[in-house]
Amino acid sequence: MTTTNAGRRALGVIAAGGFLAGLGCSDGSDGARSSSADLFAAEASDYGAVAPISAHVLIERPGEGEPPIDDVNWFARPVMHAGTDRIVAFASHDENYLYNLTRGVRVRIPDRSDAVATPDGRFMTVPSSYTPDSNVRFYPMRPLLDALAAGEDADGVEPAFIHEHASMKRVYYQSTGVLSERTVADASVVEYRLMFSGGHDASNFRIVDYRFELDGASGAVRHVDPSGPMALCPEVLNDLNTPFISKDGRYVAAYTSETAGNSYSPGSSLKVFEIIRTHPEAGTTSCRAAVDFHFAAGKADFSFDGGMLTFHISQGGYLTPFINGGLPATTITDVVVAPLRRDERGRIVGHGGLRRVTTSVEAGVGSYFPAFFPDGTLFYVANSVPRESEEEKRFHFRVVDAQAGPWRANVFETEADAQGWRTLAALWQRSRAADDPAMAEPPFPFKEHEAPWLALSLSSGQCRALVADSREAAAASDPTDWAFLGALCDALGS
């Protein structure tokens, strides 16, 4: 027997902060684990009680009593290192930091933004838009990590390599991969591939391959041979500043649209492309489309083993590819993960379902720019109030185990299923509208391409209760195919 509509609506959506505090996860310890399973078990039919986080929360920083973070510039990325602590690089108030999320320690490191470590943990890279000489810089990671361990700022560390090139003077927002590593005599030869956005020339996104020769004993840089900048494959159309490269440097995840411009258009989609050829002399690359997700999404990140992809979806703001100082008041973002499928040759050829990690229904509040740690856990940035708010800004980094839980089919794969979920989303909004005026304010109601995401926020029990209550309240002449909607609910599983 389900609760009444009024009672269900009164439950509302549990705020993410209260949810975590109630589970004791604010101290940042790995032992403080949480799950939405208990919530779903207790309120299996209360479709108003959408779980804000559907994953085990391992760490949340800053913890209680720690200095708050009141600004995050753009994205943040994990750092590979020899220990087990979870470390990220991020920027705040135009200064770069290393942040040990396990221990709650953060220190300054060089330059102003977009500090991204190479996947092997040897170097921290910074694009030219945020360096004092407008050149791409590689910093040695060891002294930065030593300073973090000592709790001392390391913004005076000198770069190990500076890449000077005319068309790389104003690039920003990079991602990094390791193509190969081998031993030659007494040296280690490592080939990195970096992808950058921006710049003053027509190439926009471009890839550079760097061949580092390192001393085999000390790891010191002996020589670096960079390729010429190569324009990202022409198969990536109208990317709107979303591409990110895989850790092995061989794949790119990017939004694509055959319609130029910043507005949503039918057929636009998140895709994964394999870089099949590079042409340094011509400054070009060639790619093949490996995965089409059939929905739009913002910046993505590949797991270190290449088996997973994570990204944020955006409601109201469409893609929200850039976030500086929080979300605008008319936007909500949430985190999704997907396992990638490979063929017998190891090439990515598809994906194995979707899992929505977070659900926010509060305008200007969300979770965004997710990224994987080497151990497969996930972290993301979460803001507490809209960017325009006069309240104090607060940001948190949350580390979650996003791989345990139900994987659901892509609700965008067929138009029939997508249309069914648009209908269910409209019913869900209608059920809340009487008691929640926010359902009539941006970024609500759902746009057509946003509505199916509700499928990944509800349990099958909640969905069935929504259908039952909506059918009971409907007029006898209502043409809705209730049996089809019920079948969609059943397909959600638990």
Image (tube, rainbow, N blue to C red):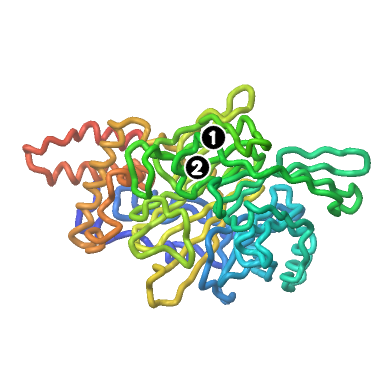
Q: Amino acid at mark 2?
A: Ala
x and y percentages locating residue 107 in the rendered image: 68, 70
Query: Mark 2: few, some, or many residues within 10 Å (few <14, many ≥20)?
Result: many
Q: Amino acid at mark 1?
A: Phe
x and y percentages locating residue 230 in the rendered image: 62, 41
Viewer-nearest residue: 265 or 118: 265
Q: Residue at x 86, y 54 (%)?
A: 220
Q: Residue at x 89, y 38 (%)?
A: 184
Dot 2: element: strand
**Gap between marks 2 and 1 measured at Cα:** 8 Å
Residue 254: numbered disc: 2
Q: Is residue 17 left or right of residue 187?
A: left
Viewer-nearest residue: 54 or 288: 288
Quadrant including the C terminus: top left
Q: Residue at x 50, y 42 (%)?
A: 254
x and y percentages locating residue 50 in the rendered image: 35, 53
Q: Residue at x 38, y 73 (%)?
A: 389
Dot 1: element: strand
x and y percentages locating residue 307 in the rendered image: 59, 37
Q: Quadrant of residue 479?
A: top left
Q: How many marks?
A: 2
- Residue pointed to by mark 1: 273
